[in-house]
């Protein structure tokens, strides 16, 4: 019998440029539609780190570099990234559904996610956005634009912005209705557009919510059977990239917490994914979380690869 799957798509599903993304989403759509063909209901979340950073920087140069365009606030840049990623994904998935003669709709919903204005994350930016730079360029951008730049796991320097936790998905009811009507829904893109509640209503805040955390929140709220985090590795490992690396096929909450304490999961990459899975299975004891690669998603659902995390 089919399951309700909330899928979080990682960076390798989208790439780094619009052209690359347009090509990559074709494979992403195939992997998604393979899961639909097996009778599953699919709800899709995705990242936006490279995209929102690119849009914001381009807008900033256009506004301050003499082109005279109005400046574009960061939350609006997040909304733009959600829009064009959603457009590429929905187009590719619609095409794949058509090729497979599957009568289903697919649409991206512009999604706001409420965060707490007092979230400590606003005092300590950690979420990498935009491109990688060498140290000299990073220092120059920090001085010129006031960006906070951090070194990212030996791969170069990137701008970092605050990453508050998701509290409430504003368009949740609409997403539920579309899924119940049999559609594939793309939502919480880039973790959702971060907004805070105020006396005058919702207001966008300059930050980027982690898409794995928002997808876990969505999976909890929708009472999904599974949170499926698709990234670039088939399985989570302990002693990752060391000679004694060991792939994990299935772990429970206690084991996951022990491995976190022992420092097996890199902050900023695998750690937030494992934490998002824990959040889901601890709050949804019947639910199961799965971390695997986009390419092997179907095999992982058949138990042939992937790392299962359950209560
Ligand atoms: N313990 C680990 N097991 C497996 N992969 C790990 C581990 N620690 C760090 N990683 C790295 O985390 C990456 C996934 O994080 P990231 O690139 O941020 O994901 P995404 O863009 O898919 O959201 C993997 O491709 C792998 O290189
Ligand atoms: N919003 C978000 O988590 O984006 P990335 O996955 O690109 O970091």
Image (cartoon, helix red, strand yellow):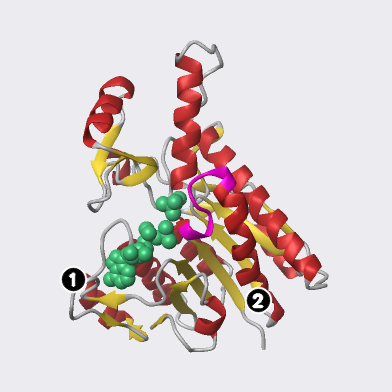
Left or right: residue 246 versus residue 198 is: left
Q: Which residue is drawn at 54% across and 88% down?
A: 302
- The correct choice, above or below, for 4 with respect to 90 in the image is below
Q: Mark 1 points at which residue?
A: 261
The numbered mark at residue 55 is none
* x then y, percent, for residue 107: 71, 55
Q: Does the magenta stretch include residue 15?
A: yes
Location of residue 158 by image quarter: top left
Bin the neighbour count of mark 2 within 10 Å (Cα to Cα): few under 14, some 14-19, many 20 and up. Answer: some
Left or right: residue 16 versus residue 164 is: right
Q: Is label 2 in a helix, a strand or a loop?
A: helix
Q: Is residue 198 magenta?
A: no
Q: Is label 1 in a helix, a strand or a loop?
A: helix
Q: Quadrant of the N terminus?
A: bottom right
Q: Which residue is drawn at 47% across and 69% down?
A: 229
* x then y, percent, for residue 5: 58, 73
Q: In the rendered image, is residue 175 in sight?
A: yes
Q: Name the residue under label 2.
A: 34
* x then y, percent, for residue 290: 45, 77
Left or right: residue 160 versus residue 77 is: left
- The correct choice, above or below, for 220 with respect to 79 in the image is below
Distance from Cα at disc 1 to Cα at disc 2: 36 Å
Bin the neighbour count of mark 1 within 10 Å (Cα to Cα): few under 14, some 14-19, many 20 and up. Answer: few
Location of residue 105 by image quarter: bottom right
Q: Give the range drawn in magenta.
A: 12-19
The one of 74 and 305 positioned closer to us in this rendering: 305
């Amino acid at each position: 019998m089919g399951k309700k799957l909330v899928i979080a798509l990682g960076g390798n599903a989208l790439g780094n440029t619009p052209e690359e993304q347009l090509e990559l989403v074709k494979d992403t759509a195939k992997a998604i539609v393979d899961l639909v063909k097996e009778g599953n209901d699919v709800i899709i979340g995705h990242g936006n780190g490279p995209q929102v950073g690119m849009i914001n920087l381009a807008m900033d140069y256009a506004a301050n570099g003499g082109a005279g365009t109005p400046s574009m606030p960061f939350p609006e840049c997040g909304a733009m990234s959600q829009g064009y990623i959603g457009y590429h994904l929905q187009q590719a998935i619609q095409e794949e559904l058509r090729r497979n003669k599957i009568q289903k709709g697919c649409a991206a919903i512009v999604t706001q996610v409420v965060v707490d204005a007092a979230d400590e994350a606003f005092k300590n930016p950690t979420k990498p956005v935009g491109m990688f730079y060498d140290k000299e360029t990073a220092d120059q951008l920090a001085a010129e634009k006031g960006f906070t730049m951090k070194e990212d796991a030996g791969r170069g320097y990137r701008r970092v912005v605050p990453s508050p936790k998701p509290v409430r998905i504003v368009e949740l009811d609409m997403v539920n209705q579309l899924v119940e009507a049999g559609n594939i829904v793309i939502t919480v893109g880039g973790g959702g557009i971060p907004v805070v509640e105020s006396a005058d209503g919702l207001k966008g805040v300059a930050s980027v919510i982690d898409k794995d955390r928002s997808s876990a929140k969505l999976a909890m709220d929708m009472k999904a059977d599974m949170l499926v985090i698709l990234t670039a590795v088939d399985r989570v490992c302990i002693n990752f990239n060391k000679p004694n690396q060991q792939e994990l096929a299935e772990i429970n909450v206690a084991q996951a917490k022990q491995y976190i304490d022992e420092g097996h999961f890199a902050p900023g990459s695998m750690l937030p994914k494992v934490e998002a899975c824990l959040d889901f299975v601890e709050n949804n004891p019947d639910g199961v979380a799965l971390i695997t690669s986009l390419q092997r998603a179907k095999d992982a659902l058949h138990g042939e690869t992937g790392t299962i995390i359950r209560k």
